[in-house]
Image (cartoon, rainbow, N blue to C red):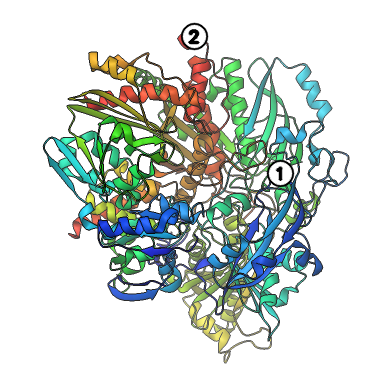
């Protein structure tokens, strides 16, 4: 292993600029002549927009322009598109209501953009926005799944009767029902997977700019995937050709999915820039983020597991209602379907699964992917249900899992829900985690805690996820309206240093470091001789960006393939220079060598020759050393692992304190262990947040109760434990690096481990399930509600 | 419009501001010191933490006029001649940052902790960070970084 | 934030004059840790913001004559770290150490906190529980008369808090159950055994700080954690929100009271 190649915990390249305060985030950019936009948002959950009078606002000091939805409509601006078509059970397409960037005729959630004010300063724009008179005619709102699916519920969209976006299913219902009819036992759960607000620390921002001389547009934006934004906004919303539109996402301060989507503000500032004749900047205040960033999760589910008398899983039956919010966000529709139901086999041999999902519109912020996206919801229900089954059947939760695991020798393994797992060893990660967590010694610790008046519990979750999204033809067949490949260009400079242009885009994952390690390792050149460029459509090839833990498995593979091409060309050049046959040239440790001889050319010499082609096979080969590769994955990757949570509850207050958290994850080959551990810890932090702290609450009228960090509980340092992380690798079988992905596992595996531990701690109170988050009040109420008999047991 | 004068990272600066101009707005928008960030509007996230007269404060919750005459220190003032401060170095060494957005506030807050407590325990670090939110790291490596930074500073006699 | 006229008076008299002449539109700012967020949200629109930051002699801690007197501009961090406070009334130092976060404590002041009378703030429990006296530029006000309701106090227009003096108790303890999100008090209790009897003051639970006379009576007979067991506070008039129902708050009053007494020793 090279000192800074694959497998080394190389310190991150990007950290120096971040640590000296010289990162460049979108709001740090100050364009010459820049103006400021403020978006007036609906304070109504559902209302008819009878009139929006902007005259007084236009007369306010510093105001340059005020626009409303009909102004954009007059310019034939399109709606924000949804990137995935889901079909109903009967094969008909889902309902896709229009999503204008500024509301037209009706507002459908608190925060829905109504008007934009452009002024010299942000405060002036805000001052003026207060002078906009909006005549709302309030309409009855539906603010939850339960309210939306009630017969006779108010309708949000005329095109979507019953507030139903789609009614989808996977599996053979009749066959599953038949198994249930004969099952020895059926374990059941009803759960609500709590709605979350992503809250990346950097609020979203966008700057639109138009160069009247060239006709070129530039959008600076907080995006995980600038090319996707360019495509969606250019082709569908503003009708700008891609060669005249540059989208640049500089340093991005966290995303977790929330910065995948094409948002209204991006289109608004880009569209308005030529009208104002100056660049326009918009930056969200956090309270705006709460009501305009896509939220996550929000599922209402009933699930049942059929078991035989030995605790073997026979079938799984799931019915989920998924909240889409008021509009379809970019990838909203695929989250509760293909990223959810396809994971319901988990790590188990359950032979048959049926899942039906109804997606519903509500008067809330759109819901889309948030770290894990569908897979945490699947994992939570499955891992809770497994624990419930174990308890029902008086089995040990670890034993029931072992009994149903897919064997380590069974790969490739075809699940009943479309996916084919390529590799894994679930027994190994479980064993390693049990040992690290000292599972065997737990009852002693429980007894000791009891003496101190504390209720101690332990919970395990053995999860799997599918990431590295995705084979384009498979995704396309399932309704994706985009390809899901990745692209990389490797530009070797004349003296042998390298610049990589990648379609992946780091928003904290450290791509500049990991990708440099890959190149340094493969080319045998110093780590510091590699530069990674990302985020700017003017520089990088068309790539799909970073989400779904895909950067290394898909983007990294594209990079490896581009380097392969460099090496292949280098061999041709070396063969010429060394007067040998190309077939005899070997490349190793940065040198092209004639096999079996000591005749060689260093990588740098080959690069120089490619650009100063004096002694060069010009009749056979173009000069230059610059290669691009596009990689479309053959399959998903399947990280899996085991998380164990041990915690204590203070029965007097209901407060939960995590005593120990253990994660053992199989993320495939590890390129940079330091970065992988950091990704897992961060994911676990968010998973614990979902399990114990975070909850997005709307009141019944659709007002956002948790509209700031004063009410929405963000995990703090003293809420979280030290997070023990280890890995156990089985290699991905279908990409050259053997990598699987590590960005989401923490958020997927941890929530059920925490809640399983909470339920275990409360076992004497007859608690079978607790919805997330297990807040102090909820725990206290649960304890109080337990009958004295149960409490005394 | 009020005039303010102060030192920022040791350099004297003067500016004309509005009464309502926040210290963070002065730093970012007028002085171009964009290392100090704004992550919330309810004074909770701590991305904006700077030092005023040697104490850590939230620059989003202080008017620029209130810093008139003060000595302000920001993240940009820590490294000298391209060499990181031991606390910055500790964050890099211990992977105490991912997206980097909360990092300047974390580092500035950590330095104030070390002033009070040269050898903070894990619990003390976690409690001190009550006013600094991070969404990327789960705090694990931030806590480690701060303890390592404090140790390095003890070693260097800082 | 709306624009305002910023003033920074050099003396208490000038501050009082500025406040009076600004009338209803005048607002005092000290550390600003509550006011500035409020202004940022455009929830208040003062015409004049009168910054007390220049009145340096309003800051400082004195212990004499069995009293700890804390100047209005003294920050929470100064109270928390004061060796004199830690020695005389450790529960008060602990209370200050638990307010907000370190940065809030470096700016926020005792005067600002008591004048604001936030129902979820820590200081009201300290002031009432320890039987303190609030000093203003015009008079002194006993703690029991100072807090009059939700964000309201006995302060008259133009009146400025200058100091708070706390008689040193024989024993005192403070226990807080923070809101998981904001970390303000869901319920916090200051319990003190003083020369004038036992005082138990609760903040966070109701619209304003209140005393629990039944607990005071029980503790007066027997200063021990167990003395408050079984004494219930009715949830009827208590606050409720998504984090804590009135019933939960009522329950927590009992738990925090017991823990305050345990902390007092």
Q: Position of residue B39 (x, y in %)?
A: 48, 56
Q: Residue A226 versus residue A124: which sits nearer the camera? A: A124
**In screen coordinates, is A285 left or right of A481?**
left
Query: Where is A392 relative to C123, above or below?
Result: above
What residue did someone put label 2 on? A788
Q: Residues within 10 Å of mark 2 (few under 14, many from 20)?
A: few
Q: Position of residue C37 (x, y in %)?
A: 45, 53
Query: Where is C196 relative to A574, above or below?
Result: above
What residue did someone put label 1 on? A363
Label 2 marks which chain's residue?
A
Q: Position of residue B146 (x, y in %)?
A: 31, 52
Q: Residue B11 versus residue A438: which sits nearer the camera? A: B11
**In screen coordinates, is A67 left or right of C142?**
right
Query: Where is C177 relative to C48, above or below?
Result: above
Who's the residue at 62% across and 63% down the image? A558
Q: Earlier in the sequence, mark 1 or mark 2?
A: 1
Q: Marks 1 and 2: same chain?
A: yes
Q: Position of residue A560 (x, y in %)?
A: 59, 64
């Amino acid at each position: 292993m090279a000192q800074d190649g694959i497998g080394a915990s190389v310190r991150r390249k990007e950290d120096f600029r971040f640590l000296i305060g010289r990162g460049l985030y979108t709001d740090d950019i100050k364009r010459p002549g820049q103006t400021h936009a403020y978006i007036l948002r609906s304070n109504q959950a559902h209302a008819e927009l009878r009139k929006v009078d902007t005259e007084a606002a236009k007369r306010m000091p510093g105001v340059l322009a005020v626009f409303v939805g009909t102004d954009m409509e007059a310019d034939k601006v399109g709606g924000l598109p949804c990137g995935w078509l889901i079909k109903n059970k009967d094969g008909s397409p889902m309902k896709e209501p229009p999503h204008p960037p500024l509301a037209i005729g009706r507002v459908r959630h608190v925060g829905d953009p109504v008007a934009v004010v452009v002024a010299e300063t942000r405060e002036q724009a805000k001052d003026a926005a207060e002078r906009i008179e909006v005549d709302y005619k309030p309409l009855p709102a539906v603010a939850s799944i339960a309210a939306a699916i009630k017969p006779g519920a108010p309708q949000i969209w005329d095109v979507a009767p019953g507030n139903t976006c789609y009614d989808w299913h996977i599996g053979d219902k009749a066959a599953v029902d038949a198994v249930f009819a004969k099952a020895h036992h059926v374990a059941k759960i009803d759960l609500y997977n709590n709605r979350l607000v992503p809250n990346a620390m950097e609020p979203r921002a966008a700057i639109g700019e138009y160069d009247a001389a060239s006709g070129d547009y530039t959008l600076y934006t907080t995006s995980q995937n600038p090319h996707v934004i360019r495509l969606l906004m250019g082709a569908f919303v503003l009708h700008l050709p891609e060669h005249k539109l540059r989208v640049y996402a500089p340093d991005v301060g966290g995303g977790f999915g929330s910065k995948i989507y094409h948002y209204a503000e991006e289109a608004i500032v880009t569209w308005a820039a030529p009208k104002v004749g100056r660049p326009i900047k918009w930056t969200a205040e956090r309270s705006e983020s709460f009501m305009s960033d896509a939220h996550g999760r929000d599922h209402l589910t009933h699930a049942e597991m059929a078991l035989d008398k030995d605790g073997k899983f026979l079938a799984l039956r799931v019915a989920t209602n998924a909240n889409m919010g008021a509009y379809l966000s970019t990838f909203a529709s695929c989250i509760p379907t293909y990223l959810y139901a396809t994971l319901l086999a988990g790590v188990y041999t359950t032979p048959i699964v049926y899942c039906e999902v109804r997606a519903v519109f509500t008067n809330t912020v759109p819901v889309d992917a948030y770290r894990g996206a569908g897979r945490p919801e699947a994992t939570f229900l499955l891992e809770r249900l497994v624990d419930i089954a174990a308890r029902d059947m008086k089995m040990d939760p670890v034993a029931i899992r072992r009994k149903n695991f897919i064997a380590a020798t069974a790969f490739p393994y075809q699940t009943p829900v479309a996916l084919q797992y390529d590799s894994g060893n679930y027994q190994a990660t479980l064993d390693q985690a049990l040992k690290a967590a000292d599972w065997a010694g737990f009852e002693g610790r429980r007894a000791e805690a009891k003496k101190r008046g504390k209720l101690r519990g332990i919970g395990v979750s053995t999860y799997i996820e599918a990431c590295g999204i995705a084979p384009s033809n498979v995704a396309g067949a399932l309704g994706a309206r985009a390809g899901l490949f990745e692209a990389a260009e490797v530009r070797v400079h004349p003296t042998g240093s390298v610049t990589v242009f990648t379609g992946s885009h780091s928003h904290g994952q450290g791509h500049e470091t990991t990708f440099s390690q890959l190149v340094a390792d493969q080319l045998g050149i110093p780590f510091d001789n590699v530069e990674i460029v990302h985020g700017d459509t003017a520089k990088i090839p068309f790539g799909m960006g970073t989400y779904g833990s895909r950067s290394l498995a898909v983007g990294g593979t594209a990079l490896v393939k581009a380097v392969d091409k460099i090496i292949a060309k280098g061999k041709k050049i070396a063969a010429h220079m060394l007067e040998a046959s190309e077939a005899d040239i070997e490349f190793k440790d940065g040198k092209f060598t004639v096999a079996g001889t000591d005749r060689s050319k260093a990588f740098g010499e080959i690069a120089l020759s490619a650009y100063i082609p004096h002694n060069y096979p010009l009749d056979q080969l173009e000069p230059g050393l610059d290669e691009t590769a596009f990689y479309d994955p053959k399959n998903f990757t399947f990280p899996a692992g085991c998380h164990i949570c041990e915690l204590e509850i203070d029965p007097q207050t209901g407060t939960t304190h995590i005593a120990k958290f253990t994660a053992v994850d199989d993320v495939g080959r590890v390129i940079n262990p330091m970065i992988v551990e950091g990704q897992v810890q961060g994911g676990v932090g968010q998973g614990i947040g979902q399990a114990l702290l975070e909850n997005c609450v709307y009141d019944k009228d659709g007002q956002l109760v948790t509209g700031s960090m004063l009410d929405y509980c963000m995990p703090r340092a003293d809420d979280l434990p030290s997070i023990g992380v280890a890995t156990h690798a089985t290699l991905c079988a279908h990409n050259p690096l053997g990598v699987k992905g590590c960005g989401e596992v923490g958020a997927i595996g941890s929530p059920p481990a925490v809640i399983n531990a909470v339920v275990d701690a409360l076992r004497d109170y007859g608690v079978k399930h607790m919805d997330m988050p297990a807040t102090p009040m909820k725990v206290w109420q649960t304890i109080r509600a337990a009958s004295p008999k149960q409490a005394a047991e | 419009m009020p005039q303010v004068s102060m030192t920022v990272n040791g350099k004297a600066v003067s500016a004309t501001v509005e009464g309502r101009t926040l210290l963070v707005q002065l730093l970012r928008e007028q002085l171009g010191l964009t290392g100090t960030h704004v992550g919330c509007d309810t004074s909770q996230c701590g991305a904006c933490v700077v030092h005023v007269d040697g104490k850590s404060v939230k620059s989003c919750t202080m008017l620029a006029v209130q810093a008139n005459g003060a000595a302000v220190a920001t993240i940009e003032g820590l490294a000298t001649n391209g060499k990181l401060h031991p606390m910055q170095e500790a964050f890099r060494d211990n992977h105490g940052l991912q997206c980097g957005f909360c990092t300047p506030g974390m580092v500035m807050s950590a330095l104030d902790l070390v002033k009070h407590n040269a050898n903070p325990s894990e619990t003390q670090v976690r409690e001190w960070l009550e006013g600094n939110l991070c969404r990327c790291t789960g705090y694990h490596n931030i806590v480690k970084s701060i303890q390592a930074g404090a140790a390095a500073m003890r070693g260097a006699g800082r | 934030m709306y624009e305002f006229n910023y003033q920074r008076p050099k003396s208490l008299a000038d501050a009082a004059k500025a406040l009076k002449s600004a009338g209803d539109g005048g607002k005092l700012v000290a550390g600003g840790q509550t006011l500035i967020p409020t202004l940022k949200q455009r929830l208040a629109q003062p015409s004049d913001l009168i910054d007390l930051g220049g009145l340096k002699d309003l800051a400082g801690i004195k212990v004499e004559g069995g009293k700890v007197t804390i100047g209005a501009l003294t920050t929470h961090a100064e109270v928390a770290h004061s060796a004199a406070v830690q020695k005389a009334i450790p529960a008060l130092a602990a209370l200050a150490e638990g307010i907000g976060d370190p940065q809030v404590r470096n700016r926020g002041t005792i005067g600002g906190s008591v004048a604001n009378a936030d129902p979820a703030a820590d200081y009201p429990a300290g002031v009432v529980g320890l039987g303190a006296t609030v000093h203003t530029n015009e008079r002194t006000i006993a703690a029991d008369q100072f807090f009059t309701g939700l964000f309201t106090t006995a302060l008259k227009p133009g009146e400025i808090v200058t100091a708070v003096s706390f008689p040193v108790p024989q024993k005192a303890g403070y226990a807080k159950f923070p809101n998981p999100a904001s970390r303000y008090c869901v319920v916090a209790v200051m319990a003190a055994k003083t020369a004038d009897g036992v005082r138990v003051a609760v903040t966070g639970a109701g619209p304003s700080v209140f005393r629990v006379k039944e607990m005071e009576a029980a503790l007066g007979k027997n200063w021990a954690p167990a003395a408050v067991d079984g004494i219930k506070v009715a949830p009827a008039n208590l606050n409720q929100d998504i984090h804590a129902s009135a019933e939960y708050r009522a329950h927590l009053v009992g738990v925090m009271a017991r823990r305050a007494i345990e902390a007092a020793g």
